[in-house]
Image (spheres, rainbow, N blue to C red):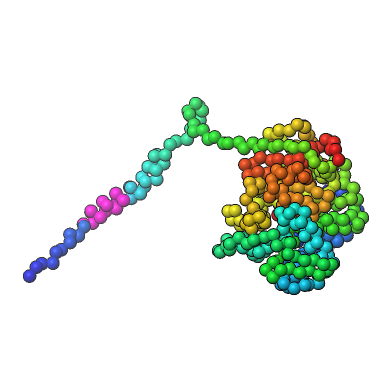
């Protein structure tokens, strides 16, 4: 006849010790994560510290202007924002019809 | 500028006039423009089961008598198809349905299409017969006058607004616009939207002092990658030509609508025939719009 194995029961003191350890780890975890990350440059560095450079690609549209083929009731008003290549120059009409000001309406497909 | 906005034909409509005009005249013109749009939407919407267009499509295979206005617009569409050798095609509806645009656009974008169908052949406009007010569609063909009827309605509405007593009027229905009457000196400024901008930023600007502008864009009314409402009749699929947007000028908005679709399909070749601005998918803008201040030889 074999005896039933008995598991050793943790004492109150041991349980209290483990609880303190778990609590301390939980408290330290976020601080560890913060410390592991690189620090941003601060005013203390005097701006001399090398900062990571983020390159923003600026998109410049190329505008190609061809010769007109008909007498149309419309004029192209150059408003800037891109490079253009053309045999003829473009400029804002500047007329009282507000083509040089804010556009009155727009077209862009529906 | 005096403005009146409303919604019709699934898009925003704007009536624009000089701010010095009589407010009562403007109000009368606005009411007239709304009436024109409501009438033509009821006649030509493919999303209304009781529209004349739906009844005509349901009667495919037999001769149907249509209203004089419907006959006029159908004739305009068939003429445009013949002139453009089918690049503008009023019989692309089966292809459009197969691509997923099978319900009002607000509902299309509400949920991605679960199942798309194989591309459908186009070019059946040659088999559509119109004799006076009698129209006959082949059995498996449906008409879609969508963009053309919108441009035509813009033309009618702009002329009606001027007939109400406005010195000039501009009607814009979702980018298809027409100016009628005597516009202000220097024209009315119209921004061409950037097809790559979700906020519809300005790509360029034109001064319009006569005629109409229309824009076709593959980035609007799009419901998935390479899924949009502009069908290439040559393939039966949404157009993939390297052109993302085309804005065309014409004396009438109906014609500008046809030209913008041709420019989107043909690209820069179209600039040899008419006035347009084309945007390539790499962002290059090619235009033959005469620059402001330049004299243009007729």
Name of the residue lying farthest toward the front: B127
Q: What span is in magenta?
A: A11-22
Residue occupying the point 37% across, 42% down? A32
Q: Position of residue B233 (x, y in %)?
A: 67, 56
Viewer-closest of B37 and A19: B37
Examine the residues drawn in magenta and state their main secondary structure.
Answer: helix
Task: Reply above or below: A83 against B192.
Answer: above
Q: Quadrant of residue B174?
A: bottom right
Residue occupying the point 39% across, 39% down? A36
Viewer-closest of B221 and B147: B147
Q: Position of residue B267 (x, y in %)?
A: 69, 45
Residue occupying the point 51% across, 33% down? A53
Q: Position of residue B169 (x, y in %)?
A: 86, 52
Q: Quadrant of residue B45?
A: bottom right
Task: Reply above or below: B234 against B64.
Answer: above
Left or right placement of residue B166 versus residue B11 in this view = right
Q: Is residue A16 magenta?
A: yes
Which quadrant of the rendered structure holds the C terminus of chain B? Answer: top right
Q: In this orientation, does residue B203 appear?
A: no
Q: Is residue B131 magenta?
A: no
Name of the residue lying farthest toward the left: A1
């Amino acid at each position: 006849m074999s005896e039933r194995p008995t598991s050793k029961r943790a004492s109150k003191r041991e349980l209290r010790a483990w609880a303190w350890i778990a609590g301390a780890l939980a408290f330290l975890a976020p601080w560890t994560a913060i410390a592991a990350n690189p620090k941003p440059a601060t005013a203390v560095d005097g701006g001399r510290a090398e900062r990571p450079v983020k390159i923003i690609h600026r998109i410049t549209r190329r505008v190609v202007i061809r010769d007109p083929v008909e007498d149309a009731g419309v004029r192209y008003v150059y408003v800037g924002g891109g490079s253009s290549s053309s045999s003829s120059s473009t400029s804002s009409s500047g007329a009282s019809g507000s083509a040089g000001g804010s556009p009155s309406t727009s077209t862009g497909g529906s | 500028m005096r403005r009146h906005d409303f919604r019709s034909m699934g898009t925003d409509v704007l009536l624009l006039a000089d701010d010095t005009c009589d407010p009562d005249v403007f109000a009368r013109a606005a009411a007239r423009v709304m009436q024109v749009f409501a009438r033509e939407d009821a006649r030509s919407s493919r999303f209304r089961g009781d529209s004349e267009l739906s009844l005509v499509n349901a009667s495919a295979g037999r001769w149907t008598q249509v209203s004089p206005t419907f006959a006029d617009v159908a004739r305009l569409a068939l003429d445009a198809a013949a002139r453009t050798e089918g690049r503008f095609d009023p019989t692309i509806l089966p292809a459009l349905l197969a691509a997923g645009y099978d319900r009002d656009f607000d509902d299309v974008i509400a949920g991605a299409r679960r199942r798309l169908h194989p591309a459908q052949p186009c070019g059946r406009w040659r088999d559509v017969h119109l004799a006076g007010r009698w129209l006959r569609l082949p059995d498996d063909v449906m008409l879609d006058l969508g963009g053309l009827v919108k441009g035509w309605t813009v033309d009618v509405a702009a002329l009606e607004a001027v007939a109400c007593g406005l010195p000039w009027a501009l009607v814009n229905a979702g980018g298809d616009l027409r100016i009628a009457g005597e516009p202000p000196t220097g024209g009315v400024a119209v921004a061409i939207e950037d097809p790559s901008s979700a906020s519809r930023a300005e790509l360029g600007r034109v001064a319009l002092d006569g005629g109409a502008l229309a824009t076709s864009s593959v980035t609007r009314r799009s419901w998935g990658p390479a899924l949009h409402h502009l069908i290439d009749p040559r393939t039966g699929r949404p157009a993939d030509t390297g052109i993302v947007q085309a804005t065309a000028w014409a004396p009438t908005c109906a014609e500008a609508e046809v030209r913008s679709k041709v420019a989107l399909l043909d690209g820069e070749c179209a600039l040899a025939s008419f006035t347009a601005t084309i945007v390539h998918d790499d962002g290059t803008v090619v235009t033959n719009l005469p620059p402001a201040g330049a004299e243009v030889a007729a």
